[in-house]
Each structure stands twice: as structure tokens, then as C-alpha cells.
Image (cartoon, grey):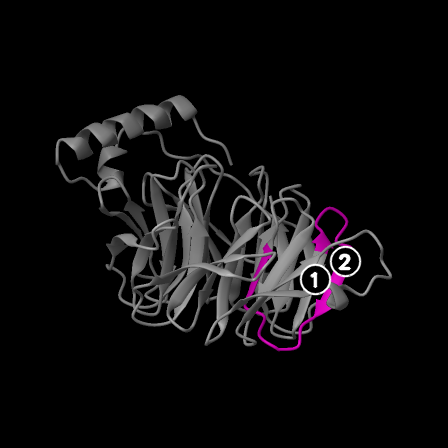
Amino acid sequence: LGCDGLQELQLLQLWNSRCSNHQLFAVHQVAERVEALGQFVMKTRRTLKGHGNKVLCMDWCKDKRRIVSSSQDGKVIVWDSFTTNKEHAVTMPCTWVMACAYAPSGCAIACGGLDNKCSVYPLTFDKNENMAAKKKSVAMHTNYLSACSFTNSDMQILTASGDGTCALWDVESGQLLQSFHGHGADVLCLDLAPSETGNTFVSGGCDKKAMVWDMRSGQCIQSFETHDSDINSVRYYPSGDAFASGSDDATCRLYDLRADREVAIYSKESIIFGASSVDFSLSGRLLFAGYNDYTINVWDVLKGSRVSILFGHENRVSTLRVSPDGTAFCSGSWDHTLRIWA
């Protein structure tokens, strides 16, 4: 999933100089001289079976091996992606567990959905331990929980909800630290800025808006509204200077934060189904996008062209994440399975 770093650096410098000269260019125009990507083959290397209904969300552990997934059946499962073994399983009190996240330490998971709550479960090596007994309810919204993510520590968690807000919570006390109001409808997704000191995050929702927030002030600092339908997924570019979005309008888009505008659209006339989930390769050269037509499209971020289409799932792809070391990615589907691709 790598890329020629020097070439990319030169391209970004060129792009930045043009942005600072207030010339407006699309990425593919600036990238004309960049070499096209060669053919590459990605296959399903593992299939994770065990959920009894639609897989709705998944997240990688920082150890690059374990995965947490949540499903419409109310189950949250921790998997070993190498062996496909299930290491932990929790049955939630509600169905439609739409959000799950791994803590940075790998010692806890968070999840929630139609219960309007975000619950944190500590993970131990004791197979006989009742995990439900150690459950801690951290966040409380007035509508369903759509997404959650730990910040750079296990001590704080960021949530998004169908009540139209995002919120930052203290895990230990369950106290609300900051709330983020600005979306005009359900918030469906969020992503934390990648830098260690990053105090911003981006959210997307049913109001067709992607909004960038300052976590300290609670203020929206940038807003983008170029999609024609709900934004289902947002993901920062690895450098943190841009983010991608996937929408029910069947397009993915790239927004440059320094140029404060949309700089690329990833679409084809033949793609008519919505994009449910997006993520970048480690270098940022590839954008993986899961769609409701059961496929995963791989886009060349710089050229704007599709470089591969991956088949395997038998129902819509609902979630997709690249592993922390960039060697593989995992997709979850309404076909009840997760697949590891490499």
C-alpha cells in the first residue's frame, strides 16, 4: 500500500504553492505528471464469521492484530485477525450496536447504538470473567449513538449521535467535558485528527455537511457542504491536512483544510449506490471505499481514477478500516461477516 514518498512530497509542495497563490486546482490537475499506479492485487486473506446479523462497525487495536466488531444482533466481538479466533464477546442490552472502538492501550473497548449510550468494557485475559459486570456507562445522548472514538488516551471518548450533536466525555467519571452543536440533523460519523497533539475532529451527517471542530472550544472551525445526500463516513488524510468523505450520493470527496475547499470527487457513472465507509492507505495514495452494492472500490487519490474493484461480500459493505501498520484492511458487511484484505 506504499507510494513513492519523494514524488508525493514534491507534488504536495507544488499543490501548496498553488494554493497559497490562490489558484484553484483540482488534485488530478496538479498530479498530471505523477506516474499512474500499476496493477495491484488484493484478496480476501481471512473471513471472520460469528455474528448472527448485519455487521455495523469495526475498529483495529493498536497492536495491529486484534479487531472489535459490533452487529445488529446486539453482539460485540473481539477477534484475533491472524487466527480468526474470538477472544471476547459481549451481548449488549440493545440491538443495532452501531458504534464500537478499541482503546489506545488495547485494554478496553467502547460500544453503543440504539441504547443512546456509550459503554466501556475493560478487557482481561481471564476467559471466565463476566465482562458485562465490569461495564461502565460513559456517555448518554437523547438519540441513538452512531459513532465513538477514544481520543489519544483511554481517559476520554468522543461520541456522535442521532440527536444532532457530538460530545467529549471523561471515561472515569462519565462527565460531559464538551458538546458540539451545529449539525442540522443526525450525526453519522466522526474521525479524530491524526496528529498526537491534534485537538480537532471532523464529523458528517444527514444534513449533508462535514464539519471540523475544535475540541477545546467546542466551536466549528470549518464546514463543507458539497454532497447531495447523507455523509456516512469521514476520514482524515494521514498528514491531517485533508479528509475524505463517503456519501449516499454515490461519491467520495476530498477536502483540503488549508485551501478550505473540495479538491477531488471520486465517482463514476456506473456507481449508483451510496458509499458507506472510507479509509486511506498509510501513504495516502489510495482511498478504499465500501459501497451498498456489495463492492469495495479502490481510488487513486491523486489521479482521481479507480484502480481496483474488490468483490467478495454478499451484502452491503457497512464498515472498513485500514490496519494501523497499513499492511491490510478489514471490511464488515450486512452479510454477517468481516473480511481481511491484503
Q: Between residues 219 and 94, which one lies in front from this camera angle?
A: 219
| Residue that badge 1 annotates | 77
At label 2, which amino acid type do we have?
Lys
Residue 339 location, x and y as percent? 63, 55
Left or right relative to 216: residue 127: right
- Return the x and y of residue 329 as percentages of the image width and height: 57, 47
Labelled pair 2, 1 in contact (Cβ < 8 Å): yes
Q: Residue at x 25, y 55 (%)?
A: 224
Quadrant showing the C terminus: top right
Foreground of the two, 40 or 79? 79
What separation in Å lies between label 2 and label 1 (alpha carbons)?
Answer: 7 Å
Q: Residue furthest left?
A: 22
Image quadrant of residue 11? top left
Q: Residue 246: which disc? A: none
Residue positioned 55% across, 42% down in the render: 41
Dot 1 alpha-carbon crowd within 10 angstroms: few under 14, some 14 to 19, many 20 or more: many
Q: Which residue type carries mark 1?
A: Ile
What is the secondary structure assignment of the residue under circle 1?
Answer: strand
Stretch of the chain drawn in magenta: 79-101
**Residue 308 in the image: above or below residue 291:** above
- Label 2, secondary structure: give it: strand
Residue 267 shows in the view: no
Q: Residue at x 39, y 21 (%)?
A: 6
Circle 2 crowding by C-alpha within 10 Å: few under 14, some 14–19, many from 20: some
**Of the image marks 2 and 1, the number of the one nearer the N terminus:** 1
State the count of labels. Answer: 2
Quarter where residue 302 is shown: top left
Q: Position of residue 305 (x, y in %)?
A: 34, 45
Residue 148 visible, this angle: yes
Q: Is residue 100 magenta?
A: yes
Residue placed under numbered mark 2 in the picture: 86
